[in-house]
Amino acid sequence: MPASAYGQLVALAREIALLTSTEALLSWDQETYMPAGALDHRARQLAYLNGKAHGLATSNAFRRLLDKAEGQTSETPYHAGNLRELRRQHERAARLPQLLVQEESAACAHAKAAWTEARRKTDFTNFAPHLQVLVDLARRKADLWGYTDEPYDALLETYERGARTRAIAELFDRLRPELAAIAQEAVARSAGRKSALPGGRYPVAKQQQLNAEIAASIGFDLDCGRIDTTAHPFCTTLGPRDVRLTTRYDERDFTSSLFGVLHEAGHGLYEQGLPPGDFGLPSGTSCSLGIHESQSRLWENHVGRSRPFWEKWLPRARELFPQLRKVRLNDFLRHLHRARYSYIRVEADEATYDLHILLRFDIERRLILGELPVAQVPEAWNAGFRELFGMTPPDAARGCLQDIHWSMGGLGYFATYTLGNLNAAQLFATARRQRRIAAGLEKADYAPLLAWLREKVHNQGGALLPGEIMANATGKPTQAQWHLKHLRARFLQNAKKS
Amino acid sequence: MPASAYGQLVALAREIALLTSTEALLSWDQETYMPAGALDHRARQLAYLNGKAHGLATSNAFRRLLDKAEGQTSETPYHAGNLRELRRQHERAARLPQLLVQEESAACAHAKAAWTEARRKTDFTNFAPHLQVLVDLARRKADLWGYTDEPYDALLETYERGARTRAIAELFDRLRPELAAIAQEAVARSAGRKSALPGGRYPVAKQQQLNAEIAASIGFDLDCGRIDTTAHPFCTTLGPRDVRLTTRYDERDFTSSLFGVLHEAGHGLYEQGLPPGDFGLPSGTSCSLGIHESQSRLWENHVGRSRPFWEKWLPRARELFPQLRKVRLNDFLRHLHRARYSYIRVEADEATYDLHILLRFDIERRLILGELPVAQVPEAWNAGFRELFGMTPPDAARGCLQDIHWSMGGLGYFATYTLGNLNAAQLFATARRQRRIAAGLEKADYAPLLAWLREKVHNQGGALLPGEIMANATGKPTQAQWHLKHLRARFLQNAKKS
């Protein structure tokens, strides 16, 4: 037993992490391999462990140690940062009754299964009662946590510390016309550009081979991680040396699984770069989703859709998929940089992606404000979609049922995707100013870039606020200009420049 | 909260099962998909949950409820059986200090990884320190549990309630000359019989297809279970509707994975046949390993190596593996019924299998008695092997490193394999006396057999003793005659009869 209050608090936080990382395995297994019949028991296991972890995080013992450690002089700013975050987590957790936590955990396990089924049958009505339960839970949580302006703030805080709904809404309002204009012109320029991707089968096993080689080449450690198959790609951390990615395969298009892997490996590199000795502590945990998404989007888009990347990897892809032999690099890049209005967010190109986010943010905010009843979500979705994209989703699977987030109780989450895009562009623009990094990028050697991200972002863990990470790394808080500049360069100039 | 002490005790037992079934997932994942780097954290998770489950099972609350429930009149014999077993489990658990339980759990996680590595490198010295730790732990546990004759009794009791080391040793001593004689003659008769299995590749994907069809056809429910790939096949239950099998694939011989699946599906049918509402209670848990192994061996050998089984399935195998088109049923059966002395237990044919068990039982017993030092295990193994098989294992991977059991702390386990063989033959001989079952067997329709096993064995759970299950089902406790009769019929008579 460590002597100091801080040391004992750390031991308790690590104990909680044993429970939450076990929950992460239960969830990962539910998504990847669990047989359908096992759902009820799985929901009970998750609710039980969740309740235990919550019980420890809100216990008198935890509070007493926190009080005591705060009363002692912090040995380092690092300790002070951990204490500040542990206090924040404790206060937030303590406001939620254990029963609510267990209720939510079980509700999510069932909602996830119901969502999968509803999406398959493209029938919103089967999912609606589950969404109602989760919206009600989210509003109850927001009330218990408290907020200044509106309840959505309290939910947003879960994913993006310090962010405020109104500020994001204002940012999105400013961005909307610019993003819409870029999208419109990009789509117009791409119109009539044919796919450069030849037909024929791209076998899953060969896609897996290529994806693993590429993930390893950007630094993802497959001895401490793996890549599985799910309906909805994700990245999850099951332990300090256990980071698991998933993707999905389309045998007509190898780039679908590949960009899924690049995106999730971006998340995975962040998780693998956290200080492993700090697992379970704020300093060993990612900072926010807006920072997390900056890592995935950076590797997926700024690296993975660049010319030097494919100068290196197209020849390898040609070895695995002979039908690519006649595809020229320029044409392939033009293919990757096509812009189209489409229904599915995760398949959207960079030029139109953020429009999907603006729509979701608006709908979620109104759901939580109580302005939009659950039953009217499909209608509101389709109306908002028409306004932004000029077309109507043909069914709910390509409309409001497409994303997994709500079924996981993840209300308040979506805005962080666009924050991530902004952060990604800002970090990448800053990093490439360094000669070694820029030289590495030119020859698809990503070790210098990764080293910079490790130092500026990954190793920082979560003891700093997102704005502090960005300011320390780039000299400025999150700004939109870099992202807009990147989109214009990629979509509105000669394709050769991108 | 249920009103009666019995009801509250049941609720507590179910809570413990939430923890132990989560441990089962952690272990399953360790064997199937976990990246190597994750080991340390996994060991900590397992030790933590194990400690929590042990804490609950030995708590004052558990004991008080047990005392109180025992003091009240049992409503049914079923309640009385559960109480008797919960008392026994509680007393045994309470004798082990929590620290020892956690120590063992972590030691096993590490030993399993060390064993995998040692077997790969065929180097016993790397595994020896781990085995020493586990033998010491086993002896400490035996001392804490107590025993009348010798410490091995206390370990055996974990796997086979009511069994005694001396009685098994006497049984094995009686069986040894008979088994050796059968093996010798069977091997002699098979000598020079060529393999009827044509060369060429048997692709894993097609093996998986056939295995899944066969598992489903004998009644294994794949909506409440699955089949994965591991170095060492096993069956594990992660919840009342979540039973997972594993096998391994040899692309030169499809029967290797298939008999692995039939064996594990036999275990799986037992688990899927336990009363699902009693999950976590003795009445919802298997009776003993000797009963469990009777189910796996029954389906693997008595069903899976029979003529009617292959009358049905050889045509299907020919569709999947064209090289089988010219193989005649008689030749294929003669191939399946070949007997050979071989080094690896799990690949041994029925005629020689039990000899592998006699060897292990003897070595384990002497290890636990302290008569055999860990360092001398390879030597003792090879000497014993020479005596029984007339040949010396060429290396440790084909000798004392071949089995996973010790690395899982499973000392006291092996004897139940031969008990399982005896029980399988006795149950099968009894069942097939019923006309409906016999008629089903002739046309490879196993529903009547499964219904009988469900009633006589699976639904019984673990509230009865193994001897009671056998006596209720067959009129007699476990006897060797049926197994010997089966081996003689299969190996020492005309192959057509088998």
Image: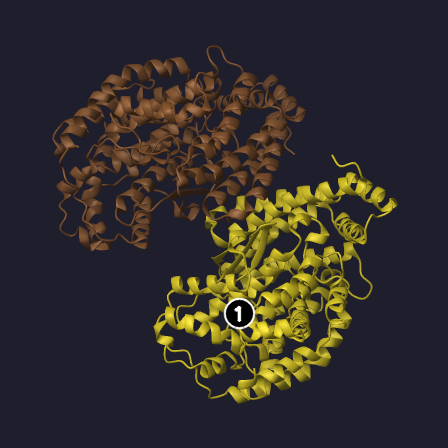
Chain colours: A brown, B yellow
Instruction: Tell me if residue A355 comes above or below residue B187 in the rendering.
Output: above
- Considering depth in this image, is A332 or A197 the residue closer to the camera? A197
Q: Position of residue A435 (x, y in %)?
A: 22, 31
Residue A368 shows in this picture = yes
- Considering depth in this image, is B444 or B238 the residue closer to the camera? B444
Residue at the extreme top of the image, as rendered: A148
Q: Chain of mark 1?
A: B
Q: Residue at x 41, y 38 (%)?
A: A119
Q: Position of residue B361 (x, y in %)?
A: 67, 70
Residue B232 shows in this picture = no
Element class at badge 1? helix
Q: Residue at x 50, y 35 (%)?
A: A111
Crowd band around label 1 with a 10 angstrom C-alpha radius: few (<14), some (14–19), many (20+): many
The N terminus of chain B lies in quadrant: top right
Q: Position of residue A263 (x, y in %)?
A: 33, 37
Q: Position of residue A327 (x, y in %)?
A: 14, 47
Q: Which residue in the structure is indicated by mark 1?
A: B396
Residue A181 vs residue A244: left or right? left
Q: Amino acid at mark 1?
A: Ala
